[in-house]
Amino acid sequence: MSSLLLSASTPTLLLPAPDVAALSWLLRGKLVVASAALSSNLVAALLAAGASGVLCRASNKSDGMRNAVQLSIDDCCTFFDVLYDALLGGSRALHALHAAEAQVPQLANVFTIYLP
């Protein structure tokens, strides 16, 4: 799924927001997790297609730069390990995000969750 939605340079390059509706059968009720920042149009399209939420990097709008925080591989691995463990344990997405941020505080506020 992530290979369809994301590329390293522009997350919407491979799947423009208007084409997301065709994947509603796949997205319905699913949490979409991306390590990149997604455009607001793509997030809205994912939610409109039935995703239960979208968790991705937050855009830094104050200085116009996206993804200004550098992520270490170790921090990301720990963050996503805690996130997925919490989700698999039955936690809601927001609680799983908070658990991951508590474990890796240097990534607090780097990711955000959008809910329908």
Image: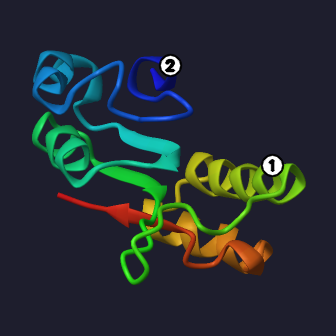
Measured as percent of width and height from the top left, residue 36 is found at 52, 47
x and y percent of residue 45 in the render?
Answer: 15, 40
Mark 1, secondary structure of its residue: helix
Disc number for residue 88: none
Determine whether 17 is above or below 40 in the image: above
Image quadrant occupied by the N terminus: top left
Front residue of this view, candidates 4 and 53: 4
* N-terminal label among 2 and 1: 2
Image-quadrant location for residue 110? bottom right
**Going by the image, does 4 lie left or right of 68?**
left
> Residue 77 got which mark?
1
Tag 1: residue type?
A: Cys
Q: Percent from the top left, x then y, of residue 2?
A: 49, 26
| 58 is higher (above) or lower (below) than 73 | below
Q: Nearer the viewer, mark 2 or mark 1?
A: 2
Q: For residue 24, what is the image quadrant?
A: top left
Q: How many dots with numbers?
A: 2
User: Could you tell me residue 34's position as x and y percent?
Assistant: 50, 43
Residue underneath mark 2: 3
Tell which of 9 and 88 is nearer to you: 9
Q: Amino acid at mark 2?
A: Ser
Where 51 falls versus 24 (above or below)?
below
